[in-house]
Image (cartoon, rainbow, N blue to C red):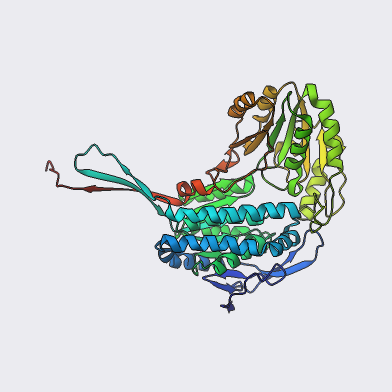
Amino acid sequence: MAEEKAVHAFAGVRRPVRHFIGGSWVEAVSGRTYDNRSPWSGDVLSQVAAGDGEDARRAIEEAQSAFAGWAQTGPARRQAVFLRAADVLEAERGRVVEALALETGCATHFAHVQIDFAANLLRQAAQLAYRPTGELLPSDMTGTHAMAVRRPVGVVGAIAPWNASLTLSGRAIVGPLALGNTVVLKPSEESPYTGGALWAEILQEAGLPAGALNVVTHAPGEAGLIADAMLASRLVKRLNFTGSTPTGRRLAEKAGTHLKRVVLQLSGQNPLIVAEDADLNYAVDAAAYGAFLHQGQICMCARRIYVARSIAEPFLEKFAAKVAALPIGDPADPKTVVGPVINEWALALLERRVKEAVDAGAKILAGGQATPPCYPATVLIDVPADAEIVQGETFGPVVTVEVVESAEAAVDRANRSDLGLAASIISRDVRQALHLAARLEVGIVHVNDQPVNDEPHMPFGGVKDTGWGRFGVGFAAEEFCELQWISVREQSRSFHF
């Protein structure tokens, strides 16, 4: 297996992407590679190592070997790594924006959103080195002192998607690392650089010890080889996954056979409710941003808009006009709002689902006609309840609008979904909006905002078929640490036999 010990900081998305294992850049054991293609141009950006279970097992062993040293590293050194990493990332902002556009079709605005989130994530994670690791507990046994102590679990497997590749891979690895765990990261085959190798470059340059983070890439259709190795290994103590509900369900089933805890953040079918008293112009702007940021390829994007009947006509008129005017094209152009969808399969799925809905009686108010490799921002009304586009998560720039009698009725409609990630409510009556928020069966509700919101320290996650567990620096210890009860007696006790 070829190895490269020298550090090549920020080799870039156009350089070959290798595995990062034990602090070295290495080829796949099999020697296989695959083409990493740009969703905008179709050009081959680089050759990527096509890993399998053998590569994953080697990465897991390296992570296990590095665990004791990293877990016992003093807090000042651990903190310094993450603070330096944030500075490294921000210093390379221009290159990262370019890489996100080339590899994932990410337009300039959302690229900066991702970079800002990742830098904040690193800086907030840095303080975990000085957070209390436990608490004293009162005991009813005289002379006994009790403690609950959190300890890092060991090796964490992280499986991250392509759609917000920098942000979601960072979220998958930074919290576990900051708590003293080591990580094996499997990025998506669609984002091997911005969701994988880039993080290895950043953290290696920042001084993270060899083996603490390992990255294993794979060819399309071969993710299961890496995931199965993570699930089967007794060295991997936790697994976190962000992706679709069907895939998350399969992972959870397999994890159960190994009694392995997993954190799952899965699909969203997120409602945006426009109440009767909403500021109309603000609601239109919020809905457009929440539905079409990054071409609707964000798990938090608004998929369903419920608008009160009393304001439905002017809302639809203004909303359709705004959406129809959103610029489409090259993600490298700062003016672009709607860039390419991630691949040809995604484009074909959007075309099929929109056509099916229209054939069943839905009406198109804006968009609806593909301009490969892009699909325009599209608004549908009168969509039948059994149409596929409203049954599950349709990952792309399509939103449905339903007119309801009231915001209360909108909550009832929203709660019929099996998914429950995020929601938002636009209303001038904040007290009433908070009442509605308490009734929504979702993990996240934003009042007077759209649903695409995240901060590194917030408890991010959903309910129902959207998974379980919470991401977020402030809650990472609950997912990626073991809680140990320790008691100490200051004097002997008597025993009955």
Q: Residue at x 56, y 65 (%)?
A: 203
Count of labels in the image? 0
Q: Position of residue 212 (x, y in %)?
A: 49, 65
Which image quarter holds the N terminus? bottom right
Taking depth in this image into account, of 143 and 68 the one nearest to the observer is 143
Which image quarter holds the C terminus? top left
Taking depth in this image into account, of 226 and 473 the one nearest to the observer is 473
Image side of residue 209 versus residue 366, left or right: left
Q: Position of residue 318 (x, y in %)?
A: 84, 33
Q: Which residue is drawn at 86% across and 36% down?
A: 365
Image side of residue 473 versus residue 481, left or right: right
Residue 381 seen from this side: yes
Image side of residue 352 versus residue 148, left or right: right
Taking depth in this image into account, of 232 and 76 the one nearest to the observer is 76
Q: Residue at x 69, y 24 (%)?
A: 407
Residue 160 seen from this side: no
Could you say which quadrant of the image residue 373 lies in? bottom right
3 w.r.t. 420: above or below = below
Q: Position of residue 295 (x, y in %)?
A: 76, 48
Image side of residue 466 versus residue 128, left or right: right
Could you say which quadrant of the image residue 88 lies in? bottom right
272 w.r.t. 345: above or below = above
Q: Position of residue 80 (x, y in %)?
A: 49, 62
